Image (spheres, coloured by chain):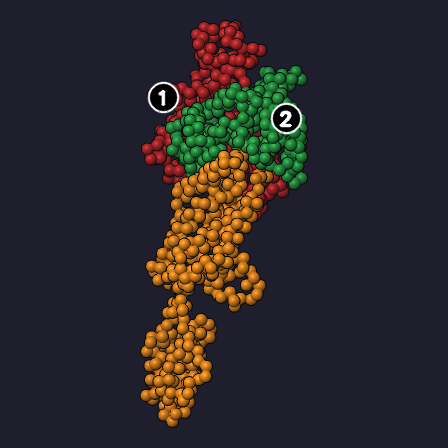
Chain colours: A red, B green, C orange
């Protein structure tokens, strides 16, 4: 049997009176892609800083790749790779030099270093662009290079803190294909993101609200638990969400893209009644289609619900 | 009526690279226009050119019919840059007060507007907090508030929601729709495809050119009519369209 | 028109107020501007002194008479020389090499006899010339002492020499070098602090990313430049006051002339130096480069070409010409005139005019080179 790649038990961090992370517990299996979601300031980055040995917990414990983050932070650092949205590449150096530099920093030298650099270069799809100055790469390629630099030492656990912020859908797609390849090879990936469509790639997702882990499950189970019922996507002009919310059987109506996501209890109300109500409230060019609930629905339900609980 | 914002064949080269290769489009008052495109497509350069911050090698930018490099029109233009552009060591209130003075707003007007914007962005509890201590979403909302203080007729937003969580993002868009309904012309660039669908019209930018332009629904309908399925097998959406169009011209 | 002017003033005020907030949030700026010059003034004032006494003097007395001992006493009596060793003249070199003596007084055998016979009694003074300043002082002092001794011993000259120079030093009668140095130091310290204060500010806006937001607003280039200049001018004037106060309190440097004139000189000089910092900041757009360029461009010229340490009249012609565009030159000259000589506007107006010209030109240059462009 293999030990989990990441274990957190009652992990907490306080800054003065403020509790940034409040008794968080979870386990991440080896080779799992684990999504860690939450609003800005919910405590995601603080958790990652504790798990990567950069910040001492004020309470609880955590083990990463079998090492205690409090007692052996240096061993933890040797076993993990870390990449953030502000990845620290040398922009004035060519691609290959960045890889060689970071490989050297990991203690590789000579032929071993060059061989590993070339291997990673091919792995992240930058073979043939060794000589390009890093600053001249488009954002997506730069981001893959940063990932390459983080996996040079074959880390067991990869921490990715908003790795795709501000990156276009194509580049994000390539990036996630890489992450899935790495996970298939046994690397554990711990990812934070604000793109909920890419959170679908995660095997399990933890949701943070105000420092607490309020939900933890697979995307499918989260949807079943937090957004029950049937989801309809309404498109058209003059859509009035407030009018729908007053209908009995309508569980939620939220703007989504240019349309509305309407969640309803199929035992109490049907699509025809929804369409009629929308038209009655002034909708034009209306079309209704049934849709699968998205993780954004889950996020809004969890975070919105918790915020309402917290409100006086 | 003349458009509020107009790009006429904008050309800008950086060395051998053509960042803008003749982009043209127009945004009218009360319209929300989205610029979408891959990284390095020229979105930021287009927005900066419209604000008069980039020397053009060709074409013309017009804001409310005027050359944005002439000072006068800046009083009627608001801009929210993509990068961090406020003063981190200054508080929320101090940042707002500073920008209001740059626009020479009378004190009473400033107070009323700042109160309203802070309430609208739910930043009123954080007046005294330093900007650098705000979360990503709150920072973006403060930047938006700073860009709106002088009630501009034209608003330029460069990736206003990148790094912002879904809840804050939704609030930002609700705010934008409110301003557009009030008659403001808004040009926004975004890498989020679901946001592109919230615009009245979008322009798909790639390699400094405008590939396609129109209401997002029309564009997706046109794409669906080409007989292509969406990536999940169902009806295609804007992201499918985006990926197909960009991949067709690598 | 009035409205435009008031908007201009509002914007300049907004920039200045914001800049003041930055300073308040990060008081290190203030320490750098106010504490550093005072510390440096104290260090320089005490450390860089041209007043030399207790010079180590070795004596090679070949005569060992009452007269030779009297001559040595004359050297050591005032404390200007200390007798450190009794040596053989042949070993003088050895003493110099080990820096044990600044001079060796050689009194040959027969000194007393010659004096008694009324014949000229020459003594020899070996001086270590490797430290020019000290050597000059040794020579001057020894000359005065020997002359006095000569007058004491010899009969009065039969007739007065047809031409005689009577030296009377005005404005710094004691010849204290602090009096001479403090005005120069004031220029030097103000120059460094002022240039460094502003060298960071415009470059900081670029690095912070806030320049884009500023450029998109109606604020003009001159408004940004002036707004950034004013708060640091206030700090600079406080700094000037501090330096003058420390100079007066610790080094007893007088202000013989008008304090207002001293302030006017300082103000114009500060505007020029702050403008120079802004110019560097505008051109480099990078705080690190700006700091280095700022330090080099203020420190070296204001120390070497201002006349603070080395008289400009003794410089080679090209350096003299170069010193004409160094504002510190006019400040040093003006301050010495106003503080030590009590000169008024009638004498000092060229210095004031030169400083004002530099200030206007450099602020105009900074504004002109300030491009409202991101790319």
Q: Position of residue A77 (x, y in %)?
A: 45, 39
Q: At numbered mark 1, what does the secondary structure look like: helix, strand or loop? A: loop
- Chain of the residue under label 1: A
Q: Residue at x 52, y 13 (%)?
A: A239
Q: Give the distance between the C-alpha atoms of the residues marked 2 and 1, in whole angstroms.
A: 45 Å
Q: Dot 2, how many residues are within 10 Å of its Cα: few (below 14), some (14-19), or many (20+)?
A: some
Q: Residue at x 42, y 22 (%)?
A: A303
Discs 2 and 1 share one subunit:
no
Q: Residue at x 36, y 92 (%)?
A: C116
Q: Residue at x 48, y 13 (%)?
A: A241
The mark closer to the camera, 2 or 1, is: 2
Of the 4 image quadrants, the one containing the N terminus of chain B is top right
Q: Nearer the viewer, residue C40 or B245?
A: C40
Using the rendered view, name the quadrant where residue A180 is placed: top right
Of the 4 image quadrants, the one containing the C terminus of chain B is top right
Q: Position of residue B107 (x, y in %)?
A: 42, 31
Q: Residue furthest front?
A: C346
Q: Nearer the viewer, residue C346 or B47?
A: C346
Q: Position of residue B200 (x, y in %)?
A: 57, 20
Q: Position of residue A70 (x, y in %)?
A: 37, 38
Residue at label 2? B25
- Chain of the residue under label 2: B
Q: Dot 1, how many residues are within 10 Å of its Cα: few (below 14), some (14-19), or many (20+)?
A: few
In the shown orientation, is residue B12 left or right of residue B110? right
Q: At numbered mark 2, what does the secondary structure look like: helix, strand or loop? A: strand
**Vertical placement of residue A276 versus C206, above or below:** above
Q: Nearer the viewer, residue C17 or A71?
A: C17
**Vertical placement of residue C302 versus A25, above or below:** below
Using the image, tell me which numbered label, if any, was put on residue B233. Answer: none
> Is residue C287 at least partly visible in the picture?
yes
> Is residue A109 at least partly visible in the picture?
no
Residue at label 1? A311
């Amino acid at each position: 049997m293999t030990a989990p790649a990441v274990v957190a038990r009652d992990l907490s961090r306080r800054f003065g009176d403020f509790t940034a992370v409040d008794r968080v517990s979870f386990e991440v299996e080896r080779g799992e892609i684990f999504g860690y979601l939450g609003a800005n300031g919910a405590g995601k980055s603080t958790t990652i800083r504790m798990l990567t040995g950069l910040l001492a917990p004020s309470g609880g414990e955590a083990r990463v790749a079998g090492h205690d983050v409090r007692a052996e932070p240096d061993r933890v650092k040797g076993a993990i790779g870390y990449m953030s949205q502000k990845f620290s590449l040398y922009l004035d150096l060519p691609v290959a030099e960045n890889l060689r530099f970071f490989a050297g920093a990991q203690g590789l030298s000579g032929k071993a270093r060059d061989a590993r650099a070339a291997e990673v270069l091919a792995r992240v799809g930058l073979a043939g662009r060794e000589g390009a100055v890093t600053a001249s790469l488009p954002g997506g390629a730069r981001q893959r290079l940063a990932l390459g630099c983080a996996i040079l030492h074959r880390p067991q656990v990869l921490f990715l803190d908003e790795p795709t912020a501000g990156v276009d859908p194509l580049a994000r797609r390539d990036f996630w294909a890489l992450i899935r390849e790495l996970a298939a090879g046994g690397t554990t990936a711990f990812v934070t993101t604000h793109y909920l469509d890419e959170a679908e790639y995660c095997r399990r997702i933890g949701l943070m609200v105000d420092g607490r882990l309020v939900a933890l499950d697979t995307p499918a189970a989260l949807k079943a638990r937090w957004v029950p019922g049937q989801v309809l996507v309404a498109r058209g002009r003059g859509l009035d969400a407030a009018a729908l919310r007053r209908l009995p059987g309508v569980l939620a109506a939220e703007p989504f893209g240019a349309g509305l996501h309407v969640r309803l209890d199929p035992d109490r109300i049907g699509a025809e009644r929804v369409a009629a109500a929308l038209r009655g409230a002034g909708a034009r060019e209306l079309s209704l289609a049934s849709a699968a609930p998205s993780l954004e629905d889950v996020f809004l339900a969890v975070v919105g619900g918790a915020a309402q609980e917290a409100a006086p | 009526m003349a458009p509020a914002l107009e790009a006429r064949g904008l050309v800008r080269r950086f060395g051998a690279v053509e960042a803008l290769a003749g982009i043209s489009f127009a945004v009218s008052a009360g319209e929300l226009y989205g610029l979408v495109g891959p990284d390095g497509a020229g979105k930021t350069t287009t927005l900066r050119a419209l604000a008069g911050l980039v020397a053009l090698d060709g074409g013309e930018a017009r804001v409310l019919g005027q050359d944005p490099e002439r000072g006068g029109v800046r009083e009627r233009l608001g801009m929210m840059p993509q990068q961090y552009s406020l003063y981190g060591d200054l508080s929320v209130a101090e940042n707002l007060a500073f920008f209001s003075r740059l626009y020479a707003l009378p004190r009473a007007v400033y107070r009323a507007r700042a109160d309203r914007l802070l309430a609208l962005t739910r930043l009123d509890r954080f007046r005294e907090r330093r900007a650098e201590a705000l979360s990503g979403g709150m920072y973006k909302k403060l930047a938006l508030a700073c860009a709106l203080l002088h009630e501009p007729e034209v608003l330029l937003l460069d990736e206003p929601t990148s790094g912002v969580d879904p809840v804050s993002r939704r609030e930002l868009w609700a705010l934008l729709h409110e301003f557009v309904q009030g008659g403001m012309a808004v040009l926004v660039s975004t890498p989020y495809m679901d946001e592109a669908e919230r615009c009245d019209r979008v322009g798909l930018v790639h390699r400094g050119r405008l590939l396609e332009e129109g209401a997002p629904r029309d564009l997706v309908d046109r794409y669906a009519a080409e007989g292509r399925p969406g990536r999940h097998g169902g009806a295609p959406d804007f992201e499918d369209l985006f990926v197909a169009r960009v991949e067709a011209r690598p | 028109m009035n409205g435009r002017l008031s908007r201009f003033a509002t914007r300049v005020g907004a920039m200045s107020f914001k800049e003041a907030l930055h300073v308040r949030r990060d008081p290190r700026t203030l320490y750098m501007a106010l504490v550093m010059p005072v510390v440096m003034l104290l260090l320089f004032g005490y450390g860089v002194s041209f007043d030399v006494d207790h010079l180590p003097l070795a004596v090679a007395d070949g005569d060992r008479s009452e007269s030779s001992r009297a001559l040595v006493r004359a050297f050591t009596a005032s404390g200007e020389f200390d007798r450190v060793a009794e040596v053989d003249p042949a070993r003088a070199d050895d003493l110099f090499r080990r820096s044990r003596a600044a001079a060796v007084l050689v009194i040959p055998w027969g000194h007393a006899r010659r004096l008694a016979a009324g014949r000229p009694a020459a003594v020899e003074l070996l001086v270590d010339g490797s430290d020019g300043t000290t050597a000059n002082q040794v020579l001057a002092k020894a000359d005065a002492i020997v002359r006095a001794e000569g007058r004491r011993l010899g009969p009065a000259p039969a007739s007065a020499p047809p031409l005689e120079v009577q030296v009377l030093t005005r404005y710094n009668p004691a010849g204290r070098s602090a009096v001479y140095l403090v005005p120069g130091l004031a220029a030097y310290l103000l120059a460094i602090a002022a240039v460094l204060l502003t060298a960071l500010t415009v470059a900081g806006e670029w690095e912070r990313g806030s320049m884009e937001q500023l450029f998109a607003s109606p604020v003009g280039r001159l408004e940004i430049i002036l707004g950034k200049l004013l708060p640091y001018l206030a700090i600079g004037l406080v700094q000037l006051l501090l330096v003058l106060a420390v100079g007066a309190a610790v080094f007893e440097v007088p202000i013989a002339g008008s304090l207002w004139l001293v302030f006017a000189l300082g103000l114009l000089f500060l505007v020029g130096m702050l403008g120079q910092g802004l110019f560097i900041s505008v051109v480099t757009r990078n705080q690190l480069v700006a700091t280095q360029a700022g330090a080099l461009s203020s420190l070296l010229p204001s120390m070497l070409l201002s006349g603070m340490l080395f008289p400009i009249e003794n410089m080679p012609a090209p350096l003299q010409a170069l010193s004409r565009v160094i504002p510190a030159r006019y400040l040093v000259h003006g301050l010495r005139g106003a503080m030590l000589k009590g000169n008024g506007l009638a004498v000092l107006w060229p210095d004031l005019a030169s400083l004002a010209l530099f200030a206007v030109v450099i602020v105009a240059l900074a504004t002109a080179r300030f491009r409202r462009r991101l790319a």
